[in-house]
Amino acid sequence: MARDSKHDILFEPIQIGPKVLRNRFYQVPHCIGAGSDKPGFQAANRSLKVEGGWAAVNTEYLSIHPESDDTHRLSARLWDEGDVRNLRAMTDAVHKHDGLCGVEMWYGGSHAPCMESRCTPRGPSQYASEFETMTYCKEMDLDDIQMVQGYYVDAAKRARDAGFDIVYVYGAHSYLPLQFLSPYYNKRTDGYGGSLENRARFWIETLEKVKQAVGDDCAIATRFAVDTLIADAGVEVERDALKFVKLADDFVDVWDVNVGDIAEWGEDAGPSRFYLQGHQLPWQRFIKQVSKKPVLGVGRFTDPDKMAEVIRSGQLDIIGAARPSIADPFLPEKINQGRVDDIRTCIGCNVCISRWEIGGPPMICTQNATSGEEYRRGWHPEKFPKAGSDDSFLVVGSGPSGSECARVLMERGYTVHLVDSGEKIGGSTNSIATLPGLGEWGYHRDYREVQLDKLVKKNKDSQIALGVKPLTVDDCLEYGADKIVIATGASWNTDGNNALTHDPVEGIDTSTPTHLTPEQVLEGSKPIGKKVLILNCDPYYMAPSLAQKLTEDGHQVTVASGVSLGNYMHFTLEAPNMHRMMHELGIEVIGDVWASKAEANRIQLYPIFGDGYRREYRGPGKLPRRENTHFDWHEFDSLVVCTGRHSNTELYEGLKTRKDEWAENDVKGVYVIGDAWAPKLMADATFDGQRLAREIELDDPQHPKPYRREVAVWGAPHMPGDTFEIEYES
Amino acid sequence: MKILVPVKQVGIIDEDYEIRDDGKNVDVDFLDYEINEWDNYSWELALNLQETYGEAVEIVPLTVGPDEAEDVLLNCLAKGGERGIRVWDDALVDSDSMAIAQVIAKVAEHENADYVLTGTLSSDHSFAATGMCVAGLLNWAHAAVVSKVDITPDAQQITVNRELEAGIEEEITVESPAVLSIQLGINEPRYASLRGIKQAKAKPVEVMSHKDFGLTDAEVGEMGSLSKVRKMYAPEHSQAELIEGTVAEQAKRIAEIVKELKGDT
């Protein structure tokens, strides 16, 4: 199919300084966990996107000097020749596909805790970071300013030498240039503080120096948070931001604009729970009114119609994307080919971001299971090795793992029967996507549904069987499949079993009328009373989501939690607004408690730190602490038991125990994936499905084969010409 | 008791398609094929009867169609039954319900069938006539749009529910042999298993021509049809327009539209 002419505007080239972007698709800097230390990962992940049509790709934020060391989080670094060598792998790979590549030069000030380098960061004034609250910076004197600006220039030269086409001075997310610009940080009274012109001076001088150093070879970009969302305590778009853009415009080849700060950068990388695509446009759109230079910006743009409209209406010139480029590295090419229904649409869950927030494990993506696996496993999101045998497959369960496994097996050319008792592909996603704000999570199901419907038409022996009676062990054995994949998911515990005690809570029984599992709440299968208590021991979204849903449905909700409520949502940047929502809806949270017993309409809670703090050996059968004596009864009409999950293993275990009957039924193997293997993130369940389908020819495909590791190699010094022996100062 | 179940491969068109050069049908290049949805229900009914009565019941799927149409017989045989029949000849191209019914009726006689179970209609042409034409040609009892049926081997008459307008059901008795056209929802069609699909490939499908039953070319195809397709086309969609602007601007545009529709401009 051909490209829809209404999307032509997205494919018009545009000049940025000395370089030309071949179209309007631009991967803004975003973290992946590669940095400069995993050059293969960096090179493969970014160059794949250029193959998929992106005009330019960037590294993640790139530290210009050891004074800007974000350890435990993972940035790229361009400190020395060793980093230049490693990052050249990326620029070479990107240039092979005729794309541009950029670096986002980063100096964090007090937001960079320097836990590896042990340096002392510098800033416009001295303050403790609101993000890294243990870290203070040193207030810069004029010598310091010259020095730090020199760091930018030196790093820019190294970037040019490494082959980069675009060099950023990074002033979004509250990093150093913005710290000078914003009165929230800048309390100076000299020529770098006070008036807007003074506060802008550091940033503009830095841009000027960088442009002078590399501006003939590289486009100069700056990422600018045009509104820090704290009114006149920080930067406001219609006041300081527009003035700053006018002052700096001559030294910038392309503006990359967003909103927010670092402590709540979910206001920029907005989760779909709270923000729709284009949510920053009300701020971003002002910049083109004063700048003569191209303006780009993000907003989780996934819909090509919206992208074209944003450009046509003069709000942005270039579509910036991080998450949509992760979910579908081939998004531009699919639009170009008119294959819009093949786009793997970002669901906005921010699980990709969670890994950076946790401190640098490789990025994962819920939609795109190949994300982060390009180099180490050799997985291409759009290419699949041909089937290695004539084996036929029965996949039981069409949730995230089962549907992904069936899809990839079919892509590889295998005959697959995907069977589910539900009326629709998607398994648990179908109910999760009905929770408040999680509608876009349904794109995970939609992508697989569309692809499976196409794939099943290509092989008349393949089949998608929905709404069927749950298969028994006998059904599976007699089905006629060579290999059986069990993806029957997980269920919430019915007895209060939990991560703290690893035992049920006495009296909890969701087969009774007043105790409910989350599934029962979502199914609407039981009446729910006015006063609801949610007993929570799950660290992710279920308890906050149910609390919101039930409150909005008119119930009076209390959450009693044994773990930090929605703890993982801190990593997905959903936590701040989740807490605001809970507060606004009047949902009471009782933290650090667990339940000793429950009855039909009341539950007994105790403080989890209610036992004695002094520990001593007291003999066998005796706790080494004073036992808790503090118990409180809390009344409810309905109790929602959100304490933990367990795999639905009946079918898998049933098949395993009858292994002696496999051969007579021509069954060569039985495998388990996703939540049925062990409850996990949707992203990891999806990964399980993809991995099993790609490794199915192994002798033991149940267990992953080793991946290619990128580690420091003993005997190969980081710096060219350096030694690696153990040496002490003498 | 022998039950003949005529099944049809129907074309599915996507949003993008073209009409054949002669303007009488959709260009086959734009068609995907699948079994007519109604036929899944009639075949399921036959499967259920065979499972209930065992060897006392033989069920045979029949299709009138070219080589590719054999897929629908394999679909059926993957779920049960031991053999299928496919009738085809180039002279059968462009047959209407009546011409197809000529063939089905001959097969029913040839097979000594006791019942013919068709779908109520096929999703492509929607005549809902083939089954009743077969009954007419055989001079058998018949019931259309059957939503419930109780067939027992050797019964002289059977009880049948027919679905009427507004959810009304009609219960009637029908003499055997009979032709029934089966409505959606009468049962829950099963899916084939992989084992069934593999086994179906080994089951015999007898391929015959209308001539094997003594029918001439003039009795089938376009010549043997009671209706002829003159033209197939997509009607123009009526167009909606969002009228924007001030009240005066909107009124002006409405006046223009009225004039356009009256043909004044």
Image (cartoon, coloured by chain):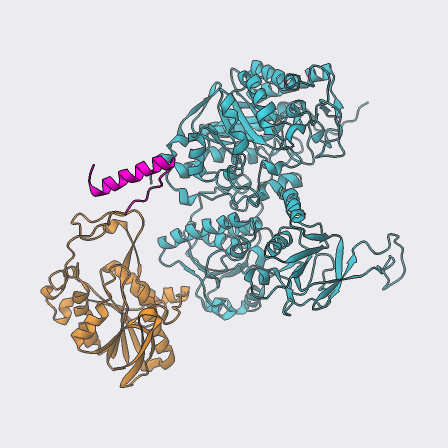
Could you tell me how many numbered marks the image carries?
0
Q: Nearer the viewer, residue A251 or A730?
A: A251
Chain identity for the colour cyan used in the image: A
Residue B174, horizontal then vertical, whole percent: 26, 81
Of the pair B97 and A720, the residue shown nearer to us: B97
Q: What is the drawing colour of chain B? A: orange
Task: Identify which residue, A74 or B99, lies in the foreground.
Answer: B99
Say if the magenta span includes residue B261. Answer: yes
Residue at the spot 16% in from the left edge and 65% down from the top edge:
B99
**Horizontal placement of A405 versus B122: left or right?**
right
Splitting the image into 4 quarters, where does residue A641 fall? bottom right
Query: Residue A38 falls in which quadrant of the image?
Result: top right
Q: Position of residue A373 (x, y in %)?
A: 54, 42
Left or right of A147: which side holds B62? left
- Residue A486's spot in the image, x, y percent? 53, 60
User: Residue A723 lies in what quarter of the image?
Assistant: top right
Q: Is residue A588 magenta?
A: no
Look at the picture and state if A114 lies above or below B214. above
* Left or right for A150, reference B37: right
> Bounds of the magenta span?
B238-265
Residue found at x 71% / y 22%: A124
The C terminus of chain A: image quadrant:
top right
- Please, is residue B116 above or below residue A627 in the view? below
Residue A154 position, x and y percent, is 63, 18
Does A64 sit above or below residue B102?
A: above
Visible in this render: residue A198?
yes
Q: Which quadrant holds the N terminus of chain A?
A: top left
Height in image: A411 above or below A240?
below
Which residue is depicted at the point 19% across and 72% down?
Answer: B105
- Can the viewer see residue A165? no
